[in-house]
Image (cartoon, coloured by chain):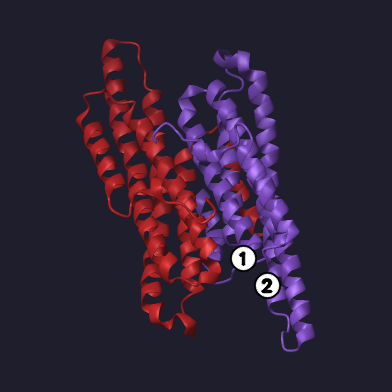
Chain colours: A purple, B red
Amino acid sequence: MLLDELNPYLNELASASPAPGGGAAAAVTVAQGLALLSMVCNLTIGKKKFSTVEAQAKDILEQVSAMRAEALSEAEADMNAFTVVMQAYQMPAETDEQKSTRKAALEKAARKAAEPPFRLMTLAAQALALADQLEKIGNPNVLSDVFVGRHLLIAGYKSSKENVAVNLNSLPPEDSFASEMRARMHDLSGTPGACPVDWHGSAD
Amino acid sequence: MLLDELNPYLNELASASPAPGGGAAAAVTVAQGLALLSMVCNLTIGKKKFSTVEAQAKDILEQVSAMRAEALSEAEADMNAFTVVMQAYQMPAETDEQKSTRKAALEKAARKAAEPPFRLMTLAAQALALADQLEKIGNPNVLSDVFVGRHLLIAGYKSSKENVAVNLNSLPPEDSFASEMRARMHDLSGTPGACPVDWHGSAD
């Protein structure tokens, strides 16, 4: 069965090994949301009834397909960055010099690890704007799949925000990278059509 | 790579074939949320620091593991029920008798198709209550994974609600099964500790 193929991934996610963890799960959720938007495009394109929106549906399909590959590649980037964080944790911390080297390595790793989930937040926000377009023009028989896609993208957005936050919170309060990243997250949530908190599906 | 194994599923989800669709995606999202709760349990159990909560973490782990298998089996049930809906749509509708037979088959299929997503809503609500427990007792180093798990479970809950709604909305307004199901959904969202709409993670 198709879903049996998901078990190796789900078992790894469930295991004590810390990667894949929340970062990969967020990315896979965004990828699922994007795949559902693709499905709605595919059930809209090529039907006479929807010929006036065909070009727009094709354009959305092209974008969401590319974005799905990006989401999965952010999952890989997330796991790699997390490995570097784990390696820094394992550095020796006996002498003052070792402690200082380890601290610098941990901070550098945390900054790097904040990037993949931030890019995923951006991707989810862009995808939510496409879901809004598709809600208006897509085949109404599969409108509930647009709504489900939106719930998954919102969850991916919020989850990625947790994953950025956990890395930034491990940095000193005065860290300029952290301040800049927090400002960028704030800007993102203020983008018109990109504030997932306000989005909801039909059954809310 | 581990995530490459997800591509056959994601490609099927994205394709014009209507199953797997939103129902399977909701179930996989719930399964991912449950897997993250398992991970947090596995990173809590067996550590001296958390020995006072070890029994509770083991109990939660046992529950979430069983629930993950249930979530995936609801995905299968959803796809099977959806196939029956599609078959009913394809029934002949030329004579009055055919129309009436088809209408009855469609209604029967819609009632059956509302059940797997309703069971998934129930499962997600139960899992959210376990996430609340785990937030209090789990290894704080992986607290953000509890939050991500919660976002995914909420998305699975809301998505399943869409999937129940789309089936109930296809039934006549006076349908008694639909009224009963709507009442059960209302009860579910009122269960103490089971109102996912109010749940949020740390980064909200």
Q: Residue at x 55, y 14 (%)?
A: A49
User: What's under tag 2, amino acid-wise?
Assistant: Met
Q: What residue is disc 2 on? A: A86
Q: Residue at x 49, y 50 (%)?
A: B29
Q: Which residue occupies the foreground of this view, B4 or A124?
A: A124
Query: How far separated are the C-alphas under marks 1 and 2?
Result: 10 Å
Estimate the x, y position of residue B100 in percent, counting from the top left.
26, 17
Q: Say what secondary structure mark 1 lies in.
A: loop
Q: Is residue B134 above or below residue B28?
A: below
Mark 1 or 2, nearer chain start: 1
Q: Say what secondary structure mark 2 lies in.
A: helix
Estimate the x, y position of residue B150 in percent, counting from the top left.
46, 55
Q: Is residue B141 above or below residue B165?
A: below
B186 relative position to B6: left or right? left
Residue A72 shows up from this direction: no
Estimate the x, y position of residue B157 in percent, counting from the top left.
40, 46
